[in-house]
Image (cartoon, helix red, strand yellow):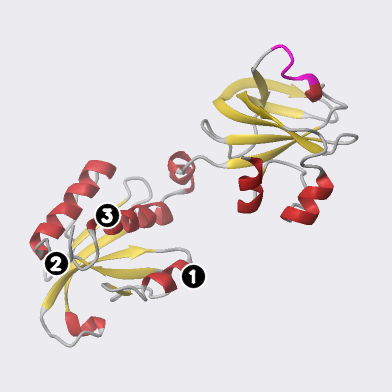
Amino acid sequence: MGKKERSANDMKDVVFAYIKKKYKVQPEYPWRKYDSNAVFRHTDNKKWFALVMDVAADKLGQHSTEYVPVINLKIDDVFFRDMLIQQEGIFPAYHMNKQHWITVLLDGTVPEDKVFNLIDTSFMATASAKKKQKIRPPKEWIIPSNPAYYDVIHAFDDAEEIDWKQGAGIKKGDTVFLYVGSPVSAILYKCKVTKTDIPYHYEDKNLTIRALMKIKLLKRYKPEKFTFTVLKEKYGIFAIRGPRGITNSLSEALK
C-alpha cells in the first residue's frame, strides 16, 4: 500500500482492529480531557503496550501545528530504537521515556505492515515473563549430556523420538542440539521438541529431574564436525553446563 493511501482515521481504525483481533484487547480512555487518547494494556500485568493519540506535528519536530494521529510503542532494544527513529514517520516518543519508546505516525507515512510489526514488538517488550515464554517464537538450544549417566551415543538407535530431561525455558516447537560430553565432546544430534512438561521425578547425588520432554531426531552430525574446540574457537561457545542459546553463525552452520 502506497504512502498516504489510507486516511488518518482509516489507519487508526485498522490499528484498533488489528489489536482487537490479535490480542483480544479493547481500548481504554483514561483521560476525560483527552477523550480520544486510547490506551491498550495487557490483561494480566496491566502494562501499556500501545498509546494512540493526536499530537501537534510541531511537537514531533515537524513544521506544522496540525494535529496528527500517532501510536506510542515500546522498543526494548536501544540499537533497534536508534535505527527506527532515523526512518520517515518514526520519532523519539512524545511524552514518554524516549530511550525505550517511539512515536509512529498513523497517517499512512509508515506502511501498515510495519506498524503491525512494531505493535507486536511492543506487546512482547511489555509482556509478563510468563506470557513472554508462552508467546515467544521457537528457539534453538544446546543441551549437554553426560555419557557416563546415559548412553546418549546410542539414544536414537531404536527410536526417532525419546524422552529427555526438560531444561528450564524450553518449550514445544524449540530445536535442541545434543552435546555429548567427554570423551566425545561434540554435538551429535539435532532434535525437535514435540512435547514438554511430562510429570517425572528422579533424584540422586548426581542428577535431579523434575519433568521430561519428548524430542524427535532431525539430523545426526559426525563427532569430528562440531567438537568443543570448534565451538569455542569458531563460534564463541566457551561453556556448556546447561541448556543455552546459540549464536547466529553456529545456527547457520548446524543447518
- Name the residue at the right extreme: 183
Q: Position of residue 35 (x, y in %)?
A: 11, 65
Q: In the rendered structure, which amino acid carries the disc numbered 2?
A: Lys
How dense is the environment of label 1, judged by Cα within 10 Å: few (below 14), some, or many (20 and up)?
few
Residue 174 or 199: which is nearer the viewer? 174
Left or right of 90, for residue 34: left
Looking at the rendered structure, the secondary structure element under dot 1 is: helix
Query: Mark 3 or mark 1, which is nearer the start of the sequence?
Result: 1
- The residue at which mark 2 appears reads as 4
Q: Which mark is residue 79?
A: 1
The number of numbered discs placed on residues in the rendered structure image is 3
Q: Position of residue 48 (x, y in %)?
A: 32, 58
Q: Quadrant for residue 233, please give it.
A: bottom right
Q: CA distance from mark 1 to mark 3?
A: 21 Å
Quadrant occupied by the C terminus: top right
Q: Quadrant for residue 227, please give it.
A: top right
Left or right of 136, for residue 248: right
Q: Is residue 126 magenta?
A: no
SS assignment for the magenta stretch, majority: loop
Q: In the rendered structure, which amino acid carries the disc numbered 1?
A: Phe
Query: Mark 3 or mark 2, which is nearer the start of the sequence?
Result: 2
Left or right of 43, for residue 135: right
